[in-house]
Each structure stands twice: as structure tokens, then as C-alpha cells.
Image: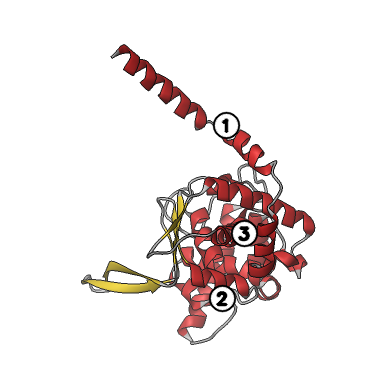
């Protein structure tokens, strides 16, 4: 009994130490000490054309982020899909665009990435405007859960990466939700980087609310502007849709929504206009 207790205590101490920030930092340094695999570089060249537009220093930083992300995050295949190395690289590359010049700690709460071959079906109970509950089936290309799961369609992931200027990217969209969910339910107001002196919560809310209201007006009048109409559903969806446009249609956003572009540039710490 005494030996069992001693082993249990020892195991508990080991697990506690492994969870310490310094241990995580040590593991990350070890991962980054290895060169970026040549076969991964070929995947980026073939599958993620956006990377080619980026400055060299950001490309190097992105590759280090990819290495850590793949080392730390479990990828799970669903509906019979076998997750390949290529899938991990393509997904990680797009997700890590959101934390360039920032810390991967923003994704510390991401527990796993579930990947379906294509669009997947979910069933939900929804309440209509008069309070009647109904079951509905939805076909989705991606979803983000507060518990730290990201669900992706591999085919939609490929399509989103292949066309890097249409403002449609399911990985950027769902991982933007994860950033928004760092401190609870997504509300279109992700917590800023610690120590960010440029962030102003009041200004952020005002700028995003104005752009969100404009999108809702466009939807009501049947007008198609820069943003996907899906973003008119809620402030959280608008933030995710705006993130897609920020990275893939930066020049158009800077021209038509300059205040919004400045807010997102301040939050993401990159300037995609300069990449084109």
C-alpha cells in the first residue's frame, strides 16, 4: 500500500511538472531546433499559395509555428478518413497565420482537430421566433466548439487554401472562432494579446459594430459586398468572416473598410496589404 501511494504521488508530481509553462517552452524549443522538413515545404508550395506572398521572415516564423502546432495538437480522422501528414501541414499552416508575430499560447485551449473527408452533417434542436423547438439537419464545412475542438471538412480546407483571394477559408474562419472563445462564448471580441497597449475595447466594439450593421443592411437589400452574408448572423460570425477577408482580400478591406482593417491589423499584428 505504501509503495502504491509513493508511486501515485510520484506520478502526480511528474504530471504537474509536465504541465508547467517552462516545460512546455522547453519542448517547443526542442521542436523548433529541428529543420523544417523538405516534404512539408513542398506541401506548402503546392497547397497553400498564400505563403508564397508573405515576407521571408514571416514565412520562417510560420514554419516554426507549424512545427509546434503539429507536435502539440492531435488530429483525428472522422467518417473513415485517415489523417495524413499533408493534411496536418495544410491545416496547421492556415491556422498559424492567425498567430504570426504573436504567441501560439492563443491556441493553448485547442484540444483536437477533427477532420471529415467532406461536408459533414450535424443535427441540432433550434427554437424559432415563436418559441417552437424543431430538429434540423445541417451540412457544414467547419465548426468550432468552446471545449477546444475544431471540426473541418478536408475538401473545403483544400478549396479554401487553393483560392487565396476569395475571402472564403474555413480554417481561418473556425480558428478565428477559437480565438474568440479563449475567454468563453464567441462574441466577436477576442481577448487581445497580453500587454497590447494599442488595443482599445471601446473602439474595437464601435468599429466592428458599424461594419456588422452595414453587412446586415446589405443582406436586407440583397446586395453583395466584400463580406460573406453568413457573417450577418451574429457578431461572432462577422468577426470570423472579417478575418477571412482580412487575410485573403486585404486591399479591398483596406479600401472599403479602413477602420476595420486597422483594428484587425492591430489585433493580428500583420499587414497583409503589404504582401500583395
| Crowding near the residue tagged with mark 3, few <14, some 14–19, many ≥20 C-alpha atoms within 10 Å | many
| Crowding near the residue tagged with mark 2, few <14, some 14–19, many ≥20 C-alpha atoms within 10 Å | many
User: 129 left or right of 244?
Assistant: left
Circle 3 SS class: helix
Q: Residue at label 1?
A: 23
Quick one: label 2 or label 3, which is nearer the N terminus?
3
| Crowding near the residue tagged with mark 1, few <14, some 14–19, many ≥20 C-alpha atoms within 10 Å | few
Circle 1 SS class: helix
Q: Tell me the quarter of the picture where residue 145 sits.
A: bottom left
Residue 169 visible in the current orientation:
no
Residue closest to the eye, 154 or 186: 154
The CA distance from mark 1 to mark 3 is 24 Å
User: 122 left or right of 200?
Assistant: left
Residue closest to the eye, 267 or 276: 276
Q: Position of residue 20 (x, y in %)?
A: 53, 30
The answer to whether 127 is drawn above or below residue 10 in the figure is: below
Q: Position of residue 146 (x, y in %)?
A: 41, 53
* Foreground label between 2 and 1: 1
User: 201 left or right of 259?
Assistant: left
Circle 2 SS class: loop
Q: Residue at label 2?
A: 227
Q: Quadrant of the C terminus?
A: bottom right
Quick one: label 2 or label 1, which is nearer the N terminus?
1
The answer to whether 52 is drawn above or below residue 6 in the figure is: below
Residue 156 visible in the current orientation:
yes
Q: Position of residue 32 (x, y in %)?
A: 67, 43
Q: In the drawing, what numbered circle is on residue 93?
A: 3
User: How is the protein colored in the picture?
Assistant: secondary structure
The CA distance from mark 2 to mark 1 is 42 Å
Q: Are marks 1 and 3 in contact (CB under 8 Å)?
A: no
Amino acid at each position: 500500500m505504501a509503495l502504491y501511494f509513493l508511486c501515485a504521488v510520484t506520478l502526480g508530481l511528474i504530471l504537474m511538472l509536465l504541465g508547467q509553462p517552462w516545460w512546455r517552452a522547453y519542448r517547443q524549443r526542442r521542436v523548433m531546433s529541428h529543420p523544417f522538413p523538405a516534404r512539408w515545404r513542398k506541401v506548402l508550395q503546392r497547397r497553400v499559395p498564400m505563403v508564397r506572398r508573405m515576407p521571408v521572415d514571416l514565412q520562417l516564423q510560420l514554419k516554426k509555428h507549424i512545427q509546434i502546432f503539429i507536435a502539440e495538437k492531435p488530429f483525428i480522422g472522422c467518417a473513415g478518413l485517415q489523417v495524413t501528414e499533408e493534411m496536418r501541414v495544410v491545416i496547421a499552416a492556415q491556422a498559424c497565420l492567425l498567430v504570426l508575430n504573436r504567441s501560439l499560447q492563443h491556441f493553448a485551449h485547442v484540444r483536437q482537430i477533427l477532420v471529415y473527408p467532406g461536408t459533414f452533417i450535424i443535427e441540432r434542436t433550434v427554437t424559432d421566433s415563436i418559441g417552437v423547438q424543431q430538429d434540423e439537419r445541417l451540412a457544414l464545412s467547419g465548426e468550432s466548439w468552446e471545449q477546444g475542438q475544431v471540426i473541418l471538412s478536408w475538401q473545403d480546407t483544400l478549396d479554401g487554401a487553393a483560392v487565396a483571394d476569395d475571402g472564403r477559408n474555413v480554417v481561418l474562419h473556425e480558428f478565428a472562432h477559437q480565438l474568440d472563445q479563449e475567454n468563453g462564448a464567441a462574441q466577436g471580441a477576442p481577448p487581445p494579446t497580453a500587454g497590447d497597449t494599442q488595443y482599445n475595447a471601446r473602439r474595437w466594439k464601435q468599429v466592428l459594430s458599424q461594419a456588422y450593421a452595414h453587412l446586415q443592411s446589405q443582406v436586407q437589400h440583397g446586395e453583395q459586398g466584400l463580406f460573406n452574408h453568413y457573417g450577418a448572423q451574429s457578431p461572432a460570425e462577422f468577426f470570423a468572416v472579417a478575418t477571412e477577408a482580412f487575410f485573403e482580400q486585404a486591399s479591398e478591406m483596406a479600401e472599403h473598410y479602413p477602420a476595420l482593417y486597422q483594428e484587425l491589423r492591430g489585433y493580428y499584428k500583420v499587414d497583409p496589404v503589404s504582401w500583395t
